[in-house]
Amino acid sequence: MKVEARDFFGSKLSWLFTLTTALLGAYLLWNHTGHIFGALPYVVLLLCPLMHFFGHRHGHQREHRHD
């Protein structure tokens, strides 16, 4: 049985998952705003190496063609 991505995104389960995630995100934002803003500088610092690593495609193996 092969499950395709379009089957999930058109289903009621995807709507339920999206709505639940949005409600939990809103709850965390409204009730824990101070914690989120306090951690924001550290999150940005932690994301910098990941953006550099994947932005320059260091994580992907590929052939270099020189014509």
Image (spheres, rainbow, N blue to C red):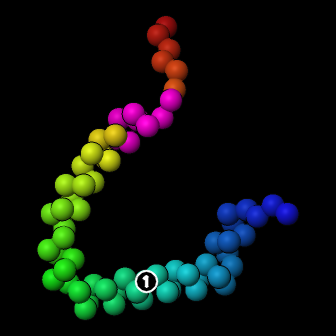
Q: Is residue 39 above or below residue 20?
A: above
Furthest residue toward top: 67
Give the amino acid at mark 1.
Ala
Q: Position of residue 28 (x, y in %)?
A: 31, 86
Q: Position of residue 61 (x, y in %)?
A: 50, 29
- Residue 60 included in the magenta stretch of the image: yes
Q: Position of residue 35 (x, y in %)?
A: 19, 80
From the viewer's perspective, tell me whether residue 42 is left or right of residue 26. left
- Which residues make up the magenta segment? 54-61
From the viewer's perspective, tell me whether residue 43 is left or right of residue 21. left
According to the picture, the residue beneath numbered tag 1 turns out to be: 22
Report the front residue among 42 and 14. 42
* x 31%, y 47%: residue: 51
- In the rendered image, which quarter is residue 53 located in? top left
* x 29%, y 41%: residue: 52
Q: Is residue 60 above or below residue 40?
A: above
* x 81%, y 61%: residue: 2
From the viewer's perspective, tell me whether residue 33 is left or right of residue 20. left
